[in-house]
Image (tube, rainbow, N blue to C red):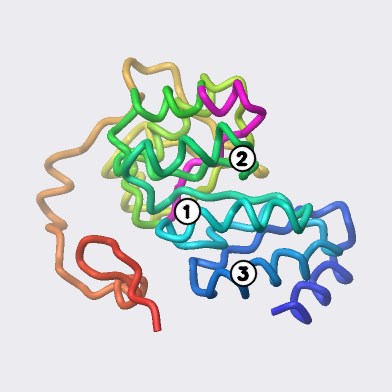
Amino acid sequence: MLRMLEHVRGAVGDEVELLHDIHERLQPIDAVRFAKDVEPFNLFFLEDALAPEDIDWFRTMRGQCATRLAMGELFVNPREWQPLITERLIDFIRMHCSDMGGITPARNAAILANAHGVKTAWHGPGDVSPVGHAANLHLDLWAPNFGIQEWCRFPDLVYEMFPGMPVVRDGYMYGNDRPGLGIDIDEELAARYPCTDEIEWWTQTRLPDGTPARP
């Protein structure tokens, strides 16, 4: 992985921001070592270096490296993210807004983060719904400490089914001036494409409740 990051940084130069997600796959001591080793590549942030049950290790990691850190997509309880924010052990909060309780808890976390110099980077992969991405965008537009927003391009059919979805052009996400989150659903179109229970690749590394299945 270090050789890959070295190659990519050498190819794109310093003008392109690089991010790397560990997905909590390393033992804490190895994660600390990795965070130190990637310092020369000046990552925009290193994501999920530690599992939620190992967050005490962030104190060790912060004390031994200058790599910017992001954490939170598996958090469900304020007691998980509050100490990381108030002690400035991370640089970006990465919570999944629906898992943490919705827009109001997300706003509260962002307010706390802003007071401690921590930015937002809400979780926004392909398994976040169109409504979830719209909620992320509205939080981004409101937050004074907005950092960056993860986003995943949906198939064209999804944009037809959910008119008003945020769109991305040239690296920027755009909403609209419609009421609420600005998104609707075409129920007739949705009825023609019922949900199926296909096995997605990412589910093979998670238990049904979202818990990581680690080696």
Name the secondary structure under disc 3.
helix
Name the secondary structure under disc 2.
loop
Q: Residue 169 in the image: state x and y as whole percent.
A: 61, 41
Label 3, label 2: how far apart the Cα atoms are? 23 Å
Name the secondary structure under disc 1.
loop
Q: Residue at x 54, y 74 (%)?
A: 26
Q: Residue 189 in the image: state x and y as whole percent.
A: 17, 46
Left or right of 110, for residue 189: left
- Work out whether mark 3 precedes mark 2 in sequence or the reverse, and give the earlier one: 3
Label 1, label 3: how far apart the Cα atoms are? 30 Å
Q: Nearer the viewer, mark 1 or mark 2?
A: 2
Residue under numbered circle 3 = 31
Is 170 or 207 nearer to us in this picture? 207
Residue under numbered circle 1 = 153
> Considering the image in quadrants, where does the C terminus appear?
bottom left
- Work out whether mark 1 precedes mark 3 in sequence or the reverse, and give the earlier one: 3
Can residue 169 be seen here? The reply is no
Residue 141 lies, with reference to residue 209, above or below; the image says above
Quarter of the image where one finds residue 57: bottom right
Q: Residue at x 40, y 59 (%)?
A: 53
Q: Nearer the viewer, mark 1 or mark 3?
A: 3
User: What amino acid is at disc 1?
Assistant: Arg
Q: Nearer the viewer, mark 3 or mark 2?
A: 3
Residue under numbered circle 2 = 148
Q: Per the image, is 120 magenta?
A: yes
Q: Which residues are magenta?
A: 112-125
Q: Classify mark 3: residues with Cα within 10 Å, few (<14), some (14-19) or many (20+).
A: many
- Contact flag, marks 1 and 3 (Cβ < 8 Å): no
Label 1, label 2: how far apart the Cα atoms are? 16 Å
User: What amino acid is at disc 3?
Assistant: Ala
Can residue 75 be seen here? The reply is yes
User: What amino acid is at disc 2?
Assistant: Ile
